Amino acid sequence: MIVAVDVDYRDAEVVAAALGFTAWTDEHASVEIVVTSDAPPAPYEPGRFYLRELPHVRGALALLAPPLDAIVVDGYVWLGAERSGPHAGPFGSMTRERGLGAHLYDALDQGVPVIGVAKTQFAGATAIEVIRGASARPLYITAAGIDAATAAAHVLAMHGEHRVPTLLRRVDQLARGLA
């Protein structure tokens, strides 16, 4: 099962949504889950967004039966380009600044690919731009556990004639309570 997840923040609660589907070209989800936390959202910390979002994403994913073939998050897996040098990591190896998707990939510790689909460009991030439908604005694709070009091809193949694929729009609507 492929899973798309999204989270919405309100004054006194957090809503996480997940939907599962079997093929990248599916128009409809086979599973839809909405999880509401009655606790107010954690404060936003610049550069540490994953701390706010990750617990809610994991809570929604925990309700889905494995195995998961891939997870699509609303946002970035990687926030910066690979870099090398003395501050890049152990022994000067290559490293990247991690976004929500990379933290999720590590937290699951199962090798499930995570694909980030962002609607806005993040300065410094290296992402593959995907143009869908008649839109002139791209989606920005990053990935962990799967080649980014393959991930971009999957997003491009997703159902829908608009910029945002049908199922990604649906999971957003579920999280925002518009469904």
Image: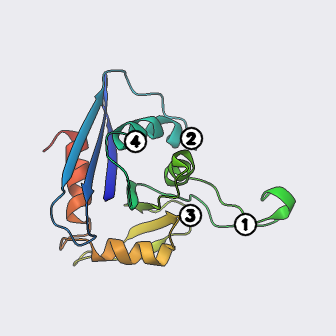
Spatial separation of the CA atoms under disc 4 and disc 3: 22 Å
Which one is earlier in the sequence, the residue at label 4 or at label 1? Answer: 4
Task: Classify mark 4: helix, strand or loop.
Answer: helix
- Quadrant that contains the C terminus: top left
Which one is earlier in the sequence, the residue at label 4 or at label 3? Answer: 4
Which one is earlier in the sequence, the residue at label 2 or at label 4? Answer: 2
Spatial separation of the CA atoms under disc 3 and disc 2: 15 Å
Q: Which mark is residue 83?
A: 1
Spatial separation of the CA atoms under disc 1 and disc 2: 20 Å
Task: Classify mark 2: helix, strand or loop.
Answer: loop
Please name the residue that numbered disc 2 is placed on: 48
Spatial separation of the CA atoms under disc 2 and disc 4: 15 Å
Name of the residue lying farthest toward the left: 179
Residue 125 sits in which quadrant? bottom right
Q: Which mark is residue 57?
A: 4
Amino acid tagged 3: Ala
Q: Is residue 73 left or right of residue 51?
A: left
Residue situated in front as seen by the camera: 13 or 32: 32
